[in-house]
Amino acid sequence: EVRSGDDKRLKKYINQFEDLCSIVADETGALIKPYSIVDYKGFLIPLESYSIKLIGKVFEEMQIEMKVERGGGGMDANRLNANGIESIGIATGYSQNHSKDEYLEIDDLIKSGEMVEKIIETFN
């Protein structure tokens, strides 16, 4: 598995990996057929974009500190952006995500619902 927010760097790394596979195959006589599948195309939404400004307005109204950070996983936003639909991911306040100890405080869950309501009301 390979991930990068930069498509050029990702392609470069995949090519290097495939070249290395060919070298190993030549040295050992092994048959290697490397291939790659891009499950999640990376994206970058500028800070001045409508989506981020909208969320900023909602967070300010809710007195929530907004942090814009680069993500490293795959989400619906990857597929939407790849198809020309500007989209961002919004964390809901969960902790220890993707582990057996993942949890979400009830108050944060309720705030998440309120946030969605305010996003809908604010969208124009």
Image: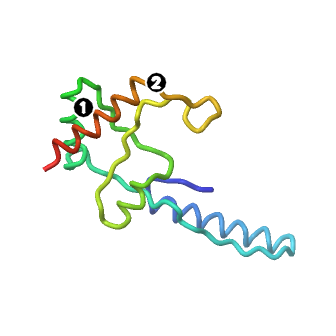
Q: Nearer the viewer, residue 3 or 19?
A: 3
Number of residues whose C-alpha sits closer than 10 Å to that of mark 2, classed few (under 14), some (14–19) or many (20 or more)? few
Q: Residue at x 57, y 31 (%)?
A: 102
Residue 62 spot, x, y in % from top left: 23, 27
Q: Residue at x 39, y 26 (%)?
A: 108
Q: Residue at x 16, y 42 (%)?
A: 122
Up the image or down, 32 lies above or below 55; here it is below
Q: Is residue 47 left or right of residue 24?
A: left
Secondary element type, mark 1: helix
Residue on which disc 1 sits: 59
Residue 105 tag number: 2
Residue 122 tag number: none
Residue 104 spot, x, y in % from top left: 49, 28
What's the distance in space between the residues labelled 1 and 2, CA to CA? Answer: 18 Å
Q: Nearer the viewer, residue 34 or 13?
A: 34
Q: Nearer the viewer, residue 18 or 4?
A: 4
- The amino acid beneath tag 2 is Glu
The N terminus is located in which quarter? bottom right
Q: Is residue 23 left or right of residue 109?
A: right
